[in-house]
Image: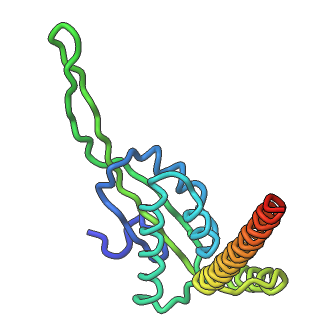
């Protein structure tokens, strides 16, 4: 009996989600988008993906990152998605009544999602940091996400302030219109008395 790593084991830190109520085909479409990407970029892709399964994949990726940080002490900005795959899980069989007393089968499929993250090679990590420094972005997935949240918060605050200013301007113009209407009415009534 052989001990050690199995032949199908891949190096890296993994996270698995089992019995996801979605087909493996739908999960594979999202996993194909993030395979080979640095985790910062993979997180952005998953946050912007429009499929519902992307939320489950995002949680699995965050779990793999947390496993690497806490169990292996690998910083998140040095990780990339080295492998990700979705295997079929058990299929729940249900039935639907059809015409003439027949029934047809409904297959409610499940899948098991696995994401493996590994440390970038030294030269790849250096190239990635040079690119980030050249573009002026914050390094690391979490730092970039925090910077983006701050920019969005500032933008929303500025938008709210502009809206308040516009409402105040409209209120002032409404007061001016009312004042003009009152003076016009006063002028008209003065003219009628003459």
Residue at 82 percent across and 80 percent down: it is 135
Picture quadrant of residue 122 = bottom right
Q: Residue furthest front?
A: 194
In the displayed structure image, the side of residue 93 where residue 111 appears, left or right: right
Q: Does residue 111 appear in this view?
A: yes
Image position of 10 with respect to 94: above or below: below
Instruction: Answer above or below: position of 154 versus 8.
Output: below
Residue 132 or residue 172, whichever sits in front: 172
Give left or right: position of 100 versus 70.
left
Q: Is residue 26 left or right of residue 5?
A: right
- The number of numbered discs placed on residues in the rendered structure image is 0
Residue 30 placed where, x, y %? 53, 54
Whether residue 120 is visible here, answered yes or no, is no
Q: Position of residue 41 (x, y in %)?
A: 64, 71
Give residue 24's position: percent from left, percent from top.
Answer: 42, 47
Which quadrant holds the N terminus?
Answer: bottom left
Residue in the image at 42% along x and 67% along y: 9
Q: Please report the residue visible at 70 percent of the width from the left and 77 percent of the height from the top.
A: 168
Q: Which residue in the rendered view is the most extreme toward the top? A: 100
Q: What percent of the width, then of the height, locates residue 53?
A: 44, 54
Q: For this view, does 126 lie left or right of residue 152?
A: right
169 or 103: nearer the viewer: 169
Q: Quadrant of residue 157?
A: bottom right
Q: Residue at x 58, y 79 (%)?
A: 79
Colouring mode (rainbow / by chain / secondary structure / one colour): rainbow
Where is the C terminus found, in terms of image quarters?
Answer: bottom right
Q: Single out the residue that lies furthest toward the left.
A: 101
């Amino acid at each position: 009996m052989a001990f050690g790593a199995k032949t199908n084991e891949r190096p890296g830190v993994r996270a698995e989600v089992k019995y996801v109520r979605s087909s493996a085909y739908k999960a594979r479409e999202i996993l194909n988008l993030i395979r080979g990407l640095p985790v910062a970029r993979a997180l952005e892709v998953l946050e912007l993906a429009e499929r519902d399964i992307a939320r489950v994949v995002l949680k699995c990726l965050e779990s793999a990152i947390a496993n690497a940080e806490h169990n292996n002490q690998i910083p998140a900005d040095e990780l990339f998605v080295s492998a990700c795959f979705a295997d079929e899980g058990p299929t729940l069989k249900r039935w639907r009544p059809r015409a003439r007393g027949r029934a047809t089968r409904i297959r409610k499929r499940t899948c098991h999602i696995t994401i493996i993250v590994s440390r970038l090679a030294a030269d790849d990590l250096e190239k990635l940091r040079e690119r980030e420094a050249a573009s002026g972005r914050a390094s690391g997935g979490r730092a970039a996400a925090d910077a983006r949240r701050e920019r969005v918060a500032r933008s929303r605050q500025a938008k709210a302030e502009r809206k308040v200013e516009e409402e105040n301007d409209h209120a002032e113009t409404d007061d001016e219109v009312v004042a003009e209407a009152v003076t016009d009415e006063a002028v008209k009534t003065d003219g009628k008395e003459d």
